[in-house]
Image: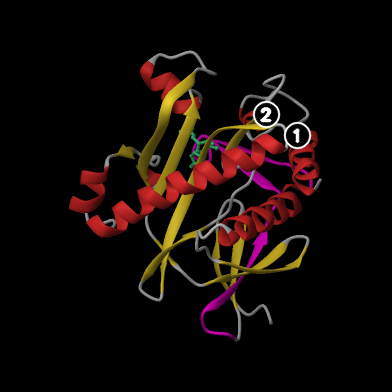
């Protein structure tokens, strides 16, 4: 497969066309942003780590029946994916209070939720990805009612699979964000699953091993990302 022209450059990835019509090459970057691009920086080896971690998790999910865009790894930083049309939704699943939910509702971080919480945000940088509900998504035609229903089921299934998998690696899956796209008329899981998009805490010490180390200037950012990948590879 050959990398042809760049189709898109995002905050963390570049996407290239290939000679195969429905296959793209994704290159993961070390650039890091937070707070809707207000905070900028770089995390050494992040691109390589996020690429490899996403590959491991997408393969696991595929085996467990969650269709997704991953096709194959090319090298440390690049993967081949199906060319999907991304739905403008960020789908967040939470198991433990943290981040924007803790802030919005005046909750302490780290409280185990009685049941998982699924949130939708409208993917729009200018608006700062505002929180919406499924009625907004359907009424604004961001997705159909059937697509929303399917996305909810898939997101909760992903949560069960990943929560269990991470626990065997000594990691607590606090919350995470997914994106879905349409491929061949069908909704499938896309984007990435990495310490950029998941909150992962050590299951014994609750040490944060994710992008909050960058967001909150906690130090040892590179080490945390590397630690997560090392544990997943064990
Ligand atoms: O900030 P918030 O608490 O809403 O984030 C919830 C989860 O979604 C976190 O795991 C965070 O890393 C992820 N997220 C993301 N991309 C965004 C917003 C949140 O990956 N634009």
Going by the picture, which residue comes out furthest to the bottom?
A: 19
Which numbered disc flags the more N-terminal residue, 1 or 2? Answer: 2
Q: Nearer the viewer, residue 121 or 52?
A: 52
As helix, strand or loop, the secondary structure at mark 2 comes to: helix
**130 left or right of 215?**
left
Residue 210 numbered tag: none
Q: Name the residue rendered at 75%, 26% in the picture.
A: 219
The x, y position of residue 164, in whole percent, is: 60, 39
User: Which residue is at a point 41% across and 29% down the rendered structure image?
Assistant: 115
Which residue carries the number 2 mark?
A: 213
Residue 17, by quadrant, is bottom right
Tell me: residue 32, above or below residue 77. above
* Span of residues in magenta: 20-45
Q: Position of residue 43 (x, y in %)?
A: 73, 42
How many numbered marks are there? 2
Residue 85 or residue 166, whichever sits in front: 166
Quadrant for the C terminus in the image:
top right
Relative to the observer, which residue lies in front, 179 or 140?
A: 179
The answer to whether residue 26 is visible is yes
Q: Which residue is mark 1?
A: 224
Whether 4 is drawn above or below 173: the answer is below
**Residue at x 67%, y 28% (from the top left corner):** 213
Residue at the far left in the pictured view: 139
For marks 1 and 2, give the CA distance. 8 Å
Cβ–Cβ below 8 Å for labels 1 and 2? yes
In this rendering, is residue 17 above or below 139? below
Is 221 above or below relative to 148? Answer: above
Residue 135 counted in the magenta span: no
Q: Secondary structure at mark 1?
A: helix
């Amino acid at each position: 497969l050959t990398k042809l022209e760049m189709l898109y450059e995002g905050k963390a990835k570049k996407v290239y066309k290939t000679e195969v019509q429905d296959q793209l090459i994704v290159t993961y970057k070390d650039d890091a942003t937070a707070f809707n691009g207000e905070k900028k920086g770089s995390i050494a080896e992040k691109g390589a780590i996020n690429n490899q971690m996403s590959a491991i998790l997408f393969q696991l999910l595929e085996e467990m029946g969650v269709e997704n865009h991953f096709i194959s790894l090319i090298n440390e930083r690049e993967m081949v994916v199906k060319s999907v049309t991304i739905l403008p939704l960020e789908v967040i699943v939470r198991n433990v209070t943290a981040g924007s939910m803790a802030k919005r509702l005046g909750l302490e971080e780290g409280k185990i939720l009685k049941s998982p919480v699924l949130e939708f945000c409208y993917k729009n940088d200018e608006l700062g990805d505002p929180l919406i509900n499924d009625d907004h998504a359907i009424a604004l035609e961001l997705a159909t009612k059937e697509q929303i229903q399917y996305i909810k089921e898939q997101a909760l299934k992903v949560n069960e699979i990943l929560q269990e998998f991470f626990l065997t690696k000594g990691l607590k899956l606090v919350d995470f964000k997914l994106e879905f796209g349409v491929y061949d008329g069908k909704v499938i899981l896309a984007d990435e699953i990495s310490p950029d998009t998941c909150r992962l805490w050590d299951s014994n010490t609750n040490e944060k091993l994710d992008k909050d180390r960058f967001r909150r200037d906690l130090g040892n950012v590179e080490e945390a990302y590397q630690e997560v990948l090392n544990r997943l590879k064990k």
